[in-house]
Image (cartoon, rainbow, N blue to C red):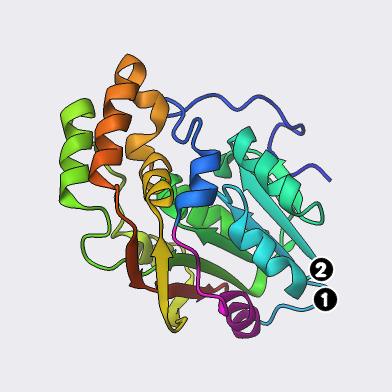
Amino acid sequence: MDWISDGKEREVAPRDDDLFKGAAEYYELGRLPYAARLPEVLAEEIGLGPESVVADIGCGPGPLAIALAPYCGRVIGVDPDPDMLARGRRRDASVTWLRARAEDLAFEAGELDAVVFGRSFHWTDRPLMAARLRAFVRPGGHLALVSEMHRPGRIPPQVKELIAEFLGEYRRPKLDDEEEVLAAAGWRGPRRLTVRTEGTLTRDPETRVAEVYSMSSSTRHRFGARLPEFDRRLRELLSEPEVIPFPATLARIWTNP
């Protein structure tokens, strides 16, 4: 089955200076985890079962795809970054890992029961994807946008200032138009599902540093020859462990009417 528009897995041309180039190992270590019960709760909410086919678009190293795999028949993890896919493949060979941009996907009409985006829909051409996904997802199927609910000041202001000192201000993608875009494409929703894990999460200095290097605004390759200086100063700022409430996970769910 060919799932990308030119019929073969091919070299994916760089976009925005290779958005997450070199970030895979730091993403896997440093990103905040989803709530432990998210896969079970989300699978029940959108009616996944043994025959269900789910695409996780912008899957990174696959935390969401791997978590959902036991609840459906097939999961397809899609990402343009080969290092991200390689890490996912090493963790779970039962997932189908596909190197492609979201905009190049060409699933058959109604082939998918659900599509999920874990912190990734904002990197796509949102109006284009919202419309195309209506065709790829069967009537009555679902689209879910999943993200952790950050506490205020997740990244310390001193770290943000340090990044800006080395790289200048970073223009982030627009994050607040997703519901408007999906409504315009005819998706019905969203329903909001918040999943919580009790307790706290302890993050050591290495994990905190990895979180910074996992972000598109501060991947290591962006610093060029100044990386050693930045790394030294970053580690000085993040030299102590932190204990935070375990982050809640928010899933916004739409239905394809």
- Report whether 245 appears left or right of 193: left
- Please tell me which residue is depicted at 43% across the width and 44% down the height of the picture: 210
* Mark 2, residue position: 73
Q: Are marks 1 and 2 in contact (CB under 8 Å)?
A: yes
Instruction: Determine the secondary structure under disc 2.
Output: loop
Magenta region includes residue 45: yes
Q: Which residue of the protein is positioned furthest toward the top in this rendering?
A: 225
Residue 116, by quadrant, is bottom right
Given residues 143 and 5, the one toward you in this image is: 143
Q: Is residue 37 above or below residue 116?
A: below
Q: Mark 1 or mark 2: which comes first in sequence? A: 1
Residue 87 appears in the figure: yes
* Residue 134, visible in the rendered structure: no
Residue furthest toward the front?
240
Segment colored magenta: 32-46
On the image, the x and y values in percent for residue 205 come to 37, 50
Kind of residue at badge 1: Pro
Can you tell which quarter of the image residue 148 is in? bottom left
Dot 1, how many residues are within 10 Å of its Cα: few (below 14), some (14-19), or many (20+)? few
Q: Is residue 66 left or right of residue 177?
A: right
